[in-house]
Image: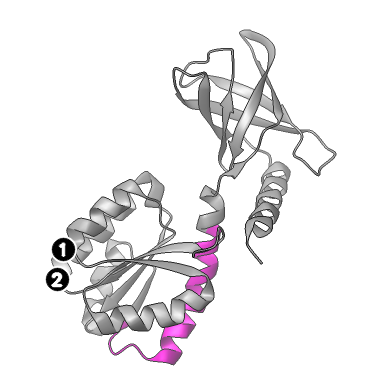
Amino acid sequence: MPKTTDVRVLLVSDNLQTIDTLRYFMEPMAMNVEVCSDIDSATRNLCRRKFEAVVIEFNDPAETLELINKSRGMTSHKGAVVLAILNSSSEMPDAFRAGANFVLVRPLLPAILMRTLRASYPLMVRERRRYYRYPLEIPVYFSSIPRPEFVATSINVSEGGMALASSVPLQVGERVSLKLTLPGTKSTTTIGAEVCWTDNAGRMGLVFVQVPTVVVERLQSWIAERMEECQPC
């Protein structure tokens, strides 16, 4: 069973040897590999789920390049690591222009494959941490120019935003200032945020904006520690 902290990799290939080879090297590195055998099913998966990396085999170069372009156009996958498996080095320029971060040329030699995975893995972890949402129920104090201060309850938090439950309705696009104290810390954190969605049950999502560097570092460190705690022994 994949761990909470495993990075999620979408492998687009119908070659059993390629699939077995990549799984053999990737899964011990905490990469949870999901396989799609064709471009259409891969596109559907990218629309439905978040992956930290996409590994694409160049069977049909035109379709493959289109998939790389599509993934780069998706908000949730704009920062995903893209690794292209090429039939020859002549395909490298097109792969990089389309948005690939790394390339491998057949045959997949173990030493080169491991070197590429070691180089790409930290980028996958960073992308995983950026989107990781930690369940968190604490009071969050809101303030804005047209409103008196009020309190809402957080639902979860990520490096880039929060989901909250509030009895005070806010409008999408409204800017607010948040004050909160993360569990296990003593200092109060103040963050500028913007409402990006609401529903009829009093829940809303906020994206962080205008966050001081020291607050970003504090939040990144706190999220990373929570991810480690969630990993089974």
Q: Identify the mark at residue 63; answer none if there is no mark.
A: 1
Neighbours of disc 2 within 10 Å: few (<14), some (14-19), many (20+): few
Residue furthest out toward the front: 1
Give, as a three-letter code, the residue at label 2.
Asp
Residue 121 lies in the magenta stretch: yes
Residues at marks 1 and 2 touching, judged by CB atoms closer than 8 Å: yes
Instruction: Check the image and report above or below for 214 versus 82.
Output: above
Image-based side of 55 in relation to 157, left or right? left
Query: Residue visible at 45% across and 91% down?
Result: 111
Chief SS of the magenta region: helix
Whole-percent x and y of residue 146? 61, 8
Instruction: Check the image and report above or below for 126 versus 201.
Output: below
Q: Secondary structure at mark 2?
A: loop
Q: Secondary structure at mark 1?
A: helix
Q: How is the image coloured?
A: one colour
Q: What's drawn in magenta, residue-wise? A: 105-126
Instruction: Answer with the quarter of the image where residue 15 lies.
Output: bottom left
Instruction: Answer with the quarter of the image where residue 38 lies.
Output: bottom left
Foreground: 96 or 86? 86
Query: Residue visible at 56% across and 37% down?
Result: 161
Residue corresponding to mark 2: 60
